[in-house]
């Protein structure tokens, strides 16, 4: 097989000699098994693969292991052991990936109390909120990956176009290699181990950098990862901005960053030095529009839950509300009632309301300034206790004063705290225009009972994700990619998207050495050759349609035969035979496909 090789020899050139250059001193030592097959050496793999390589001389005779022989590659100390381990090809096997995912699940479930305690120490989260937003979400993500890993890893075999008739097309998922994951402080466990699930499922080795502003959680993760996961493939680096800069200066095969826009720009600049692909999960001001037709009570209940979850430190929280003027007063009143119902008359005493992050310098002060600058618009809350990192759920009601609303400090950046500005608009069109005047948000929300409003909102509002009549919960769906666009990020993950995020889909075309139409591609070109070549290029899917037509013709033949012979007395027996024949045809086709994939790529 050749499924693990990523650098070194060209996999489609069999006459290329094996590399003779010595590895660069800064590159990790190569495993002897990673060397290309020398002349006369027996290829690795089973007898079927060796026979297939003899039958088709163009079959890529290549090592199943990655090579690191380029003198330009320079890696940090964190990557040397991991890349050496990656060269052995251990991460290519589904068994290894499953074992690491199960180990990660055990790490979370067996240490849930300790992890929740660390989250409480960093962010004041209650035991239940930590389970709801961090550990349980991760276990669900892991279970999804374990249940569908075989489906995700399966190569896709397809019929080639007319130009490559007589060949086989295969698209196979390959791991990218060494991955760097940098996590933020607002969900320090979920946003670090969530991307890790996709990286493990895709077969990568990973260096994790937790946020220095959640030190208790970072220390807990750093202590647990070596006990449960393969130490040669996964490591945790603790430190501040200096450590992040040092890591970003190295060459990686993928960088996954979650955090603010400013650091996101720095990540992209560092990655550009090595042309490293990046996934950025940033943020922005996610709007929430309440239409005149909305169920105001339900909207207020869900907005309060989403806006003050994790003390407002959620990247997809409703960051401001644009409410229709006809229901503005009722909506603000319902907001105040819902805050009292969910957090009690004294929110400071309830364990269900977290605290502003304790270790981040200046964040509490900036929120304090934000509330005090808009003190005349505070309709509820405004209780600030800097020594306890506490801010009560605060509602800023601007009514129709657009100038004050736009000039408010709360509207100049993402709030990331328990503060909710509310502004009254005259129509849905005005609200959409205000949203479109800003950068693309990470999420956008609409509460309405009108189908026309839903269609207009979905077609005109551009955001990373959209939810109608709810907030935040769209990010919990494993079948939907979560990510931003523009200033709110690039790329996505969760479920299959997380697997794709850390995967390269390699296309392979294998053809017979000679085909009946070989002469048509070479000069001189006669009118007949030109006609046939134009036909092939203008209708590339002709062979695929022919193959589909063949399958339909076979099935139709079985049915026609059954109809013709059903006039006899053996009606039931003949129909049963026809159905059994069609099923057998499908089974044989699937077996042939699986056998072809096994012979081509060993999967």
Image (cartoon, helix red, strand yellow):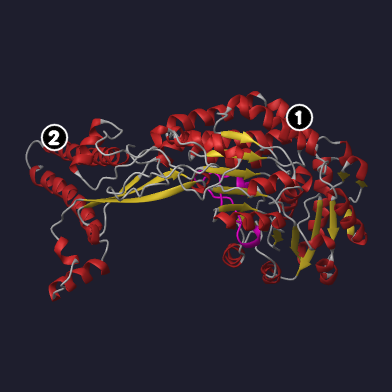
In the picture, the disc for residue 573 is 2
Relative to 15, is 390 on the left or the right?
right
Q: Of label 2 and label 1, which has the lower sequence position?
A: 1
Name above or below for residue 526 compared with residue 26: below
Query: Is any part of residue 385 visible from this angle?
Result: yes
Q: Nearer the viewer, residue 56 or 32?
A: 32
SS at mark 1 in the image: helix
Q: Position of residue 430 (x, y in %)?
A: 70, 71
Given this view, does label 2 or label 1 mark the residue nearer the observer? 1
Q: In the rendered view of the protein, which quadrant contains the C terminus?
A: top left
In the picture, the disc for residue 117 is 1
Q: Position of residue 351 (x, y in %)?
A: 82, 34
- In the rendered structure, which segment of residues is drawn in magenta? 473-496
Q: Is the Cβ of the residue at disc 2 closer than 8 Å to that at disc 1?
A: no
Q: Nearer the viewer, residue 75 or 577?
A: 75
Q: In the rendered view of the protein, which quadrant contains the N terminus?
A: top left
Q: Position of residue 487 (x, y in %)?
A: 65, 61
């Amino acid at each position: 097989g050749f499924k693990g090789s990523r650098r070194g020899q060209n996999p489609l050139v069999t006459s290329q000699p094996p590399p003779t250059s010595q590895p660069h001193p800064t590159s990790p030592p190569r495993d002897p098994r990673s060397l290309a097959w020398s002349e006369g050496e027996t290829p690795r793999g089973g007898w079927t693969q060796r026979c297939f390589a003899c039958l088709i001389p163009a079959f890529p005779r290549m090592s199943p292991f990655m090579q690191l022989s380029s003198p330009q590659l320079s890696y940090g100390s964190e990557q040397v052991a991991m890349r050496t381990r990656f060269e052995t090809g251990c991460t290519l096997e589904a068994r290894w990936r499953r074992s690491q995912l199960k180990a990660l699940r055990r790490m979370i479930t067996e240490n849930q109390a300790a992890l929740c305690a660390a989250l409480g120490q960093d962010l004041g989260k209650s035991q239940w909120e930590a389970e709801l937003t961090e550990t349980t979400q991760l276990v669900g993500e892991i279970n999804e990956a374990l249940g569908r890993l075989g489906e995700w890893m399966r190569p896709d075999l397809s019929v080639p176009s007319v130009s490559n008739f007589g060949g086989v097309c295969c698209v196979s998922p390959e791991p990218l290699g060494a991955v760097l994951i940098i996590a933020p402080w607002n969900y320090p466990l979920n946003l670090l181990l969530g991307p890790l699930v996709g990286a493990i499922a895709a077969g990568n080795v990973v260096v994790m950098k937790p946020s220095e502003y959640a030190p208790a959680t970072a220390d807990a993760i750093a202590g647990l990862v070596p006990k449960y996961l393969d130490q040669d493939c996964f490591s945790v680096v603790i430190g501040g901005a200096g450590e992040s800069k040092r890591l970003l200066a190295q060459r990686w095969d993928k960088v996954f960053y979650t955090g603010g826009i400013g650091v996101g720009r720095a990540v992209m600049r560092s990655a550009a030095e090595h042309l490293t692909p990046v996934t950025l999960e940033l943020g922005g001001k996610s709007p929430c529009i309440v239409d005149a037709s909305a169920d105001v009570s339900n909207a207020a209940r869900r907005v309060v839950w989403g806006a003050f979850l994790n003390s407002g430190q959620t990247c997809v929280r409703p960051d401001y509300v644009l409410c229709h003027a006809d229901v503005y007063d009722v909506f603000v009143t319902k907001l105040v009632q819902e805050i009292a119902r969910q957090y009690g008359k004294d929110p400071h005493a309830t364990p269900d309301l977290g605290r502003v992050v304790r270790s981040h310098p200046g964040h509490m002060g900036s929120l304090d300034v934000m509330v005090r600058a808009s003190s005349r618009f505070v309709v509820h809350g405004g209780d600030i206790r800097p020594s306890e990192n506490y801010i009560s759920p605060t509602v800023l009601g601007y009514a129709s004063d657009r100038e004050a609303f736009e000039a408010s400090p709360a509207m100049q950046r993402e709030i990331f705290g328990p503060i909710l500005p509310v502004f009254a608009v005259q129509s849905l069109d005005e609200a959409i225009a205000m949203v479109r005047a800003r950068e693309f948000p990470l999420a956008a929300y609409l509460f309405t009972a009108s189908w026309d409003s839903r269609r207009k909102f979905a077609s005109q509002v551009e955001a990373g994700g959209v939810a109608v009549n709810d907030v935040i919960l769209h990010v919990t769906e494993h079948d939907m990619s979560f990510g931003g666009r523009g200033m709110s990020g690039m790329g996505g993950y969760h479920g299959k998207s997380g697997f794709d995020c850390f995967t390269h889909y390699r296309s392979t075309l294998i053809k017979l050495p000679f085909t009946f139409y070989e002469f048509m591609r070479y000069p001189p070109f006669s009118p007949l050759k030109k006609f046939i070549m134009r036909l092939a290029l203008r209708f590339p899917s002709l062979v695929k349609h022919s193959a589909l037509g063949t399958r339909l013709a076979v099935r139709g033949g079985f049915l026609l035969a059954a109809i013709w012979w059903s006039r006899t007395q053996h009606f039931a027996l003949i129909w049963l035979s026809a159905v059994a024949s069609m099923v057998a045809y499908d089974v044989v086709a699937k077996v042939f496909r699986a056998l072809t994939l096994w012979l081509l790529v060993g999967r």
